[in-house]
Amino acid sequence: MLCVMRRKTVVHISLVLTVACATGRSELASHYRLDEAVRDPGTVVDSAGDNDGTLINPDRVARGITPAPFLAAYDFQPDVALGGGVNLGPNAAVRPQSNWTVTWWVQLDKLNAFDRMIESMNGTAATSRGIRFDLGSSPGKRVRILLRDGSGAQIALQHTRVLSTGTWYF
């Protein structure tokens, strides 16, 4: 899974996989508290396991900021082509195939149409496969989830809440 951010402050990212649908049992696959001591400037530590990620454009990511009321966060700074982000890698645990939940606290500094927050697409064409969380179409103020299966078919779900800049969302 690839998390691409454009001018967003993120406090944590969690990925929960439902591993047994019949029993409803779920387990935490990964949790990125984003508060780690920087061992390697390109590593994003999985606080719950072995699914460390790597920074995309690390020079576009400010680490160790402390936005109230939180203790630590990353600030993903914009760029003309691609801002900072996190690549969670190829491990199956962070590439769910069925039931899963992803959560994160995010504060948006800008609300641009189609601004991506989380993406695992293998391209931008209608025949791409994967999932994308973005800010939807113009004017880009609502969270949209776009699912594509590679055949050209897609499902798009858009939340009704209108977002604003400077507000923390979970």
Image: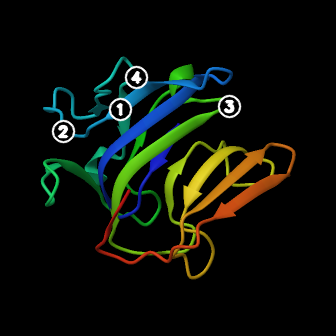
Question: From mark 3 to mark 4, how far is it between C-alphas?
Answer: 19 Å
Q: CA distance from mark 4 to mark 1?
A: 9 Å
Residue 64 x/y as whole percent: 14, 46
Q: Amino acid at mark 1?
A: His
Find the residue positioned furthest to the front. Answer: 23
Among numbered discs 3 and 4, the one appearing first in the sequence: 4
Q: Which of the two marks, 4 or 1, is nearer to us in this view?
A: 1
Q: Residue at x 85, y 52 (%)?
A: 153
Is 91 left, or right, of 152 in this rendering? left
Kindly identify which numbered label has been placed on residue 35: 2
- The amino acid sitting under disc 2 is Asp
Residue 69 is situated, as x and y percent measured from the top left of the image, at: 15, 58
Q: Earlier in the sequence, mark 2 or mark 3?
A: 2
Q: Determine whether the residue tagged by mark 3 lies in a helix, strand or loop.
A: loop
Instruction: Work out whether residue 56 or residue 106 is closer to the camera in this orientation and state it.
Output: 106
Mark 3 is on which residue type? Answer: Ser
Instruction: State if disc 2 and disc 1 touch (CB < 8 Å).
Output: no
Q: Which residue is mark 4?
A: 51
